[in-house]
Image (spheres, rainbow, N blue to C red):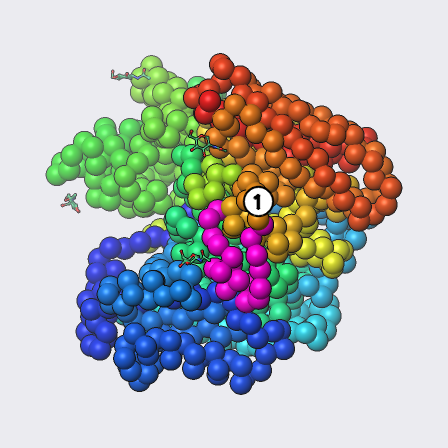
Amino acid sequence: MEIKMMRAPSVLLTFLISAFLLLPVFASNKVYIVYLGGHNHGKDATAEDFNRATNFHKEFLGYFFESKEKAQQAIVYSFTKHINAFAAYLDEEQVAQISKHPDVISVFPNQLKQLHTTRTWDFVGLERIGIVPPDSIWTKANYGKDVIIAHLDTGVWPESASFSDDGMGEIPGKWKGSCHKSGVVCNRKLIGAKYFNKGYKSVVGITPNGTTRDTDGHGTHTLSTAGGNFVPNASLFGFANGTAKGGSPAAHVASYKVCWPLGCTDSDILAAFDEAIHDGVDVLSVSLGGFSFDYFSDAIAVASFHAMLNGIAVVCSAGNNGPFNGLVENSAPWVTTVAASSLDRDFTNIVTLSNKKQILGKSRTVWELPSKKLYPLINSFDAKADNVSIHKARLCHRGALNPLKVKGKIVICLRGSIDRLGKALAVHGAGGAGMIHVNDVDGVDELVADPYIIPATMISHKDGLRLQSYLNSSKLLRGTISAGKTVIGVKPAPTVADFSSRGPNHITPQVLKPDISAPGVNVLASYTEAAPISPSKYDTRRWPFNLLSGTSMSCPHVAGIVGLLRKIYPDWSPAAIRSAIMTTARTRDNNGEPIKVERTRRTATPFAYGSGYIQPNDAMDPGLVYDLGIDDYMDFLCALGYNSTQLEKLLGKPYKCPIKKTLMENLNYPSFAIPSLNKTMTVTRTVKNVGSPGTYTARIKAPEGILVSVEPQVLQFKEIGEEKEFKVHFESTEGRVGKGYSFGVLIWSDGKHYVRSPMAVKANS
Ligand SMILES: *[C@@H]1O[C@H](CO)[C@@H](O)[C@H](O)[C@H]1NC(C)=O
Ligand SMILES: *[C@@H]1O[C@H](CO)[C@@H](O)[C@H](O)[C@H]1NC(C)=O
Ligand SMILES: *[C@@H]1O[C@H](CO)[C@@H](O)[C@H](O)[C@H]1NC(C)=O
Ligand SMILES: *[C@@H]1O[C@H](CO)[C@@H](O)[C@H](O)[C@H]1NC(C)=O
Ligand SMILES: *[C@@H]1O[C@H](CO)[C@@H](O)[C@H](O)[C@H]1NC(C)=O
Ligand SMILES: *[C@@H]1O[C@H](CO)[C@@H](O)[C@H](O)[C@H]1NC(C)=O
Ligand SMILES: *[C@@H]1O[C@H](CO)[C@@H](O)[C@H](O)[C@H]1NC(C)=O
């Protein structure tokens, strides 16, 4: 689970076969979601309204089945609260017919999506050496008291100390959720637990265990990162030790379980959102996704649209498809899309050699060789067992090493092909004392601190060559390996994680995505005790905490901060909160240099980190915000090509597209993306003063080869809440045409606030 859920094709095949056997009636059909927009019953809808909605779905589908009974049998889910949609077994002909019906916005298949911290808060400035400064957003927001944060994930391990309700206040009166029949006992911290598996059953054919309990670990990790209580002395076997806590440690949390062993389906996701909106959550953290080509054929985008209509902030992971461009997921403009960066923390150990040289490696092993004793070193290919290839010996496959040659020695193995922990066990199994894992040429300097089960370390390719030359010059070379150690203050940090998905946004490149970057590498948080801590089949150790990496981990960091801002500014829209987070982000690392990409060490662009790395304390006082209301998103959708009739269905109430179509680039977003600049273009933005009265002046660092001007260049605000419009004019220069994106920045400043917006511009002509 380090990065993505593991997929086992043979298991999938078995499930598909059983699906066929278990579903005789609609065996040849698949489940599709028919999306009809929003329900027009209001927030105070009753059970009667919900029944009416279900009945409407049956009648609507009955028309295509020519039988209400058959339609009823085909329906898997009827979403009745906010999202007007149903999921049903349909054949292709029915799909084609239904898609043409004027009341239908989209029909899309129910597909599987995939899942995509102690020291972490320290690094973003919330506390220093365990002490929370009085100007911290934590103090100002009372640690997120009364806020309700929920996730859609693999469920929750309720016994985790992160979900203890020690010191928790009363459950807010508006809360309608519960833990009824969820297999989980709730308290004042964990106030809701529900699971959704009907869509999963329709895809893989088996009904997973009916419980919200997390047997995977991912969900416990994300929920405790967003809103876990304080847990002193948390660590993974002593690594990353400190007090664990979520972004909003005093918030209430709820778990909506939609992910099962092979993934999470669209219809279960819709069901969970519909329920969560109704239950009264304030913030939703969604660390899962899939590739999609259209916002309204993607369950997360559809459902978060309805969450946004209800004032709920939805925070999503950007996906782990990096470092390639254009593969960012969850890129709808009404969600906050989160990229992942490293912390200034690492796990290292040292190989000390008899020639007095030392090599620094990465490891999370708790085992060490005695520092006074020195062990002979041997290349694994020199210790090849008779019956195996040199290739297998080089990579340290199980049974590939000759115990007579390896016994009592440190074995040098090459990285690649097989389970990394398994290699250490192969060495151990052959009687070796320890392992030095040398990176292959492809990996170069990208090292992983693994929880080896013997004294072992991973070293860079370059250091591997160095070690080889020592060994070449003296066959008597000896060495020892220390235990892994947590080190902090690593430089440079943050760096953009290689795996973090990059922009541009392939659905609407006029909206720059991802939005923001947050810690997502080796994050310590609570874990399930129903599964071992690593995906390696050789590791059976269970532990209440675990270190995980992925945009799955960075997303709940931002959800936690959104919870704090919601507490401080209960009237702010989700877009205003996002704007505050984005315009105050930092783009420099702890060397004071532009943030770099982890492996290549090249300067990162806004397609990697969005507006930058989150700075929660600054987000409390952004000065100005780029706000967005429902109408702004509607105008954007008109520009995207939806007509008034369709949009009225989404809203569940009357709406007219503007007579003069606006540009998608004019969405009042806190960043600028111009994917095809045809000589010149002018875009409009409006900023709202949320600080003290002041005079803001524009500063521009134009993208290379693009001329940028702002009008007016000075904005004067006399009161809070005052709004001012400005225009940004872009003009391409000949030399830039056809050369791809270049990046710049616009900053509005009153000398105290720096309201920063990145820009990405591509000149076509
Ligand atoms: C489901 O429950 C059964 C019995 O409690 C257990 O043996 C099995 O491992 C569970 N499966 C999953 C996927 O949690
Ligand atoms: C802290 O945790 C470690 C590792 O889990 C444990 O060995 C130690 O006893 C704990 N210390 C305290 C004071 O609880
Ligand atoms: C982690 O443990 C080490 C060794 O026990 C200790 O020196 C250090 O202060 C601890 N760090 C934190 C953040 O508690
Ligand atoms: C090689 O032979 C040894 C001893 O007979 C056996 O344990 C090992 O599994 C064999 N390895 C392979 C890859 O066949
Ligand atoms: C070590 O010696 C081997 C065999 O003589 C040679 O192929 C290899 O290039 C040498 N490696 C280094 C790093 O000197
Ligand atoms: C709106 O779009 C839908 C779907 O393309 C189409 O059926 C409908 O006629 C359009 N309505 C108007 C008023 O253009
Ligand atoms: C720029 O021109 C291209 C082709 O000439 C066109 O597809 C695109 O829509 C134009 N862009 C804008 C923003 O007008």
Which residue does the image show at 41% across and 50% down from the upper left? Answer: 294
Q: Residue 716: say if magenta.
A: no
Q: As drawn, is 462 to the left or to the right of 40? A: left
Residue receiving disc 1: 660
Image location (x, y in percent) of residue 412: 33, 31
- Indicate the position of residue 691 as horizontal and vertical percent values: 81, 44
Which image quarter: residue 687? top right
504 relative to 127 in the view: left or right = left
Ligand 5, image quadrant it occupies: top left
Residue at x-position 31% and y-position 20%: 475
Q: Residue furthest left?
A: 387
Q: Can the viewer see residue 522?
A: no
User: Which residues, given as a range, are shown in magenta?
Assistant: 640-658
Q: Amino acid at mark 1?
A: Lys
Residue at image point 42% right, 34% down? 325
Q: Residue 85 location, x and y as percent?
A: 43, 69
SS at circle 1: loop
Left or right of residue 28, residue 315 in this image: right
- Is 647 magenta? The answer is yes
Q: Quadrant of residue 47?
A: bottom right
> Depth check: 755 or 589 in front?
755
Residue 144, horizontal then vertical, whole percent: 71, 59
Badge 1 residue CB within 8 Å of ligand 7:
no
Q: Nearer the viewer, residue 414 or 127?
A: 127
Q: Decide: is 116 above or below 732.
A: below
